[in-house]
Amino acid sequence: MGKRAFKYDKVLTRKFGQKIAFLRKNLNITQDELAFRVNISPSYLSAIERGVTDTTISTAKRLAKAFNISLQELFNL
């Protein structure tokens, strides 16, 4: 069997990325710094912020922790 291609909600992904970028800028930290805190690559964080990739729940949990907010607050778009 080949790889399955999963579709994602482009509007939701874009809004989530915008929220991540907004929160990061409010903390006045770079993408490199946030990526380091969350243990992901800066290029992956950039893709999340641009809304071109979906993310995992575990990454979202680490992002929420880096922003010192709950997952609920993070997903409140």
Image (cartoon, helix red, strand yellow):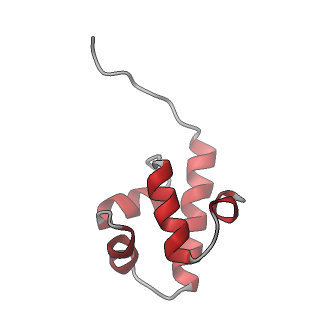
Position of residue 71 measured from the top left corner of the image (x, y, whole percent):
62, 60
Q: Nearer the viewer, residue 3 or 71?
A: 71
> In this picture, is 17 found above or below 65?
above
Q: Nearer the viewer, residue 28 or 72?
A: 72
> In this picture, is 21 found above or below 49?
below
User: Looking at the image, can residue 50 be seen?
Assistant: no
Q: Nearer the viewer, residue 58 or 49?
A: 58
Position of residue 31 measured from the top left corner of the image (x, y, whole percent):
38, 75
- Residue depicted at x 40% and y 25%: 5
Position of residue 75 measured from the top left corner of the image (x, y, whole percent):
66, 57
| Residue found at the far bottom of this picture | 28
Q: Nearer the viewer, residue 75 or 47?
A: 75
In this rendering, would 4 be left or right of 17?
left
In this rendering, would 58 be left or right of 19?
left
| Residue found at the far top of this picture | 1
Q: Quadrant of the C terminus?
A: bottom right
In this rendering, would 41 be left or right of 69?
left
- Residue depicted at x 51% and y 60%: 61
- Residue depicted at x 59% and y 57%: 16
- Residue depicted at x 63% and y 72%: 69
Looking at the rendered structure, the number of numbered marks drawn on it comes to 0
Q: Quadrant of the N terminus?
A: top left
User: Looking at the image, can residue 57 be seen?
Assistant: yes
> In this picture, is 25 found above or below 18?
below
